[in-house]
Image (tube, grey):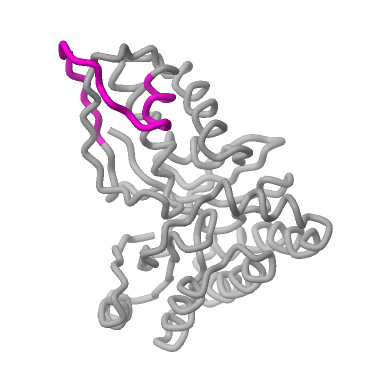
Amino acid sequence: MTHAKAIFFGEHAVVYGHEGITIPLPEMKIDVTLENTNEIQHRDDILAYIADTCEIDSKTKININSTIPVGRGLGSSAALSIAIARAKGITKAKIREIADKCEKFIHGNPSGIDVNQVLSDTPLLFSKEHGAKKLPFSLDSYLLIIDTGVVGITKHTLEHVKDNLKTYKPYIDELGNITKKVIKPLKEKNIDLIGEYMYKAHSLLKKIGVSHEKNDEVVELCKNNNAKGAKLTGGGAGGCCICLCDTKENALKIQDELKEKGYLSWMVTV
C-alpha cells in the first residue's frame, strides 16, 4: 500500500535546481495485489512498462485498488510503480531506483520529488542537488485537495516550461525563493503568511503558463470565501488545487461552494 502526495510549494522550480516542499496524503491510497493466471494480460503502455521494470511476467494479473485520482498532480504514477514493486516483493533499496526509472518514462524530465514524498510519511524539503530531507511541521489547520476535473499531463507542462525557459526563468527563480521564505512561517504556524505565499506562488505559476482556467477559478473561489491561501499543486494545466483554511467550519463552507460549482474535494489536516 502506498499514499499520495501534494506539492505545497516549488512545483516546476525544483526541475531547475530550486527546493520544493511536499506533504504526504495518507487519506489517499493505492493497494496492489498480483494474481497468477493462464492468460496474457492486456496492459496499457505505462502499466506494461512498470510491469516489465519490476520483472512481472505477462500472465500475472495486476489488481489495483486506488483512491488516488489520475492526472491530478497527486503522485498517482509514482504511487502506482511503488505499490507494484512492493507487491512483487522488491527490496526497499531497489524500489526507489525502479520508481525513478518509471517516472522518467512517464513524465520525461521529472524532478524526483514525487517518488521521495510517496516513500515518506513526513513532509519533505527536496532539491535535485541535495535530495530529500524531513521538514516536520504541523499547522493545526485544514487543507482542501480540489479536483478541477481536468486531467493535467505533467510531461506537457514540463516541456512547455523548458521550451520557454529563457522567458520564464525570473518567475521560476521567484518560485524557488518563496520555498525558502515559507520554511520559517511553516515552523511558526504563521497561517496568514503561508497563505499569502500560496496566492503569490499561484500567480507565478500562471505567468509560466502552467495554470488552467479551472485552476484559476478554484483559487479565486477559495479566496472569495476567506481561505488563507490557495494554489494549483503539481504539474498544473488542470489537475488539483490546494486550499488552506484555519478552521474546519470555513473548510466545510468552501467545500460546499466548490460542490455547487461541480468541483470534488477532499479535506485533510496539516
Say left or right for 128 vs 173.
left
Q: Quadrant of the N terminus?
A: top left
Q: Residue at x 81, y 62 (%)?
A: 167
Say left or right for 40 vs 23.
left
In the rendering, at what x and y percent does residue 66 appear? Answer: 25, 42
Number of numbered discs present?
0
Say left or right for 22 vs 42.
right
In the rendering, at what x and y percent does residue 241 appear? Answer: 45, 65
Q: Residue at x 65, y 65 (%)?
A: 209
Q: Residue at x 33, y 22 (%)?
A: 86
Front-most of residues 182 and 165: 165
Res. 265 image quadrant: bottom left
- The region drawn magenta spans 31-51
- Residue 38 painted magenta: yes
In the rendering, at what x and y percent does residue 269 appear? Answer: 33, 61
Decide if residue 26 is in sight here: yes
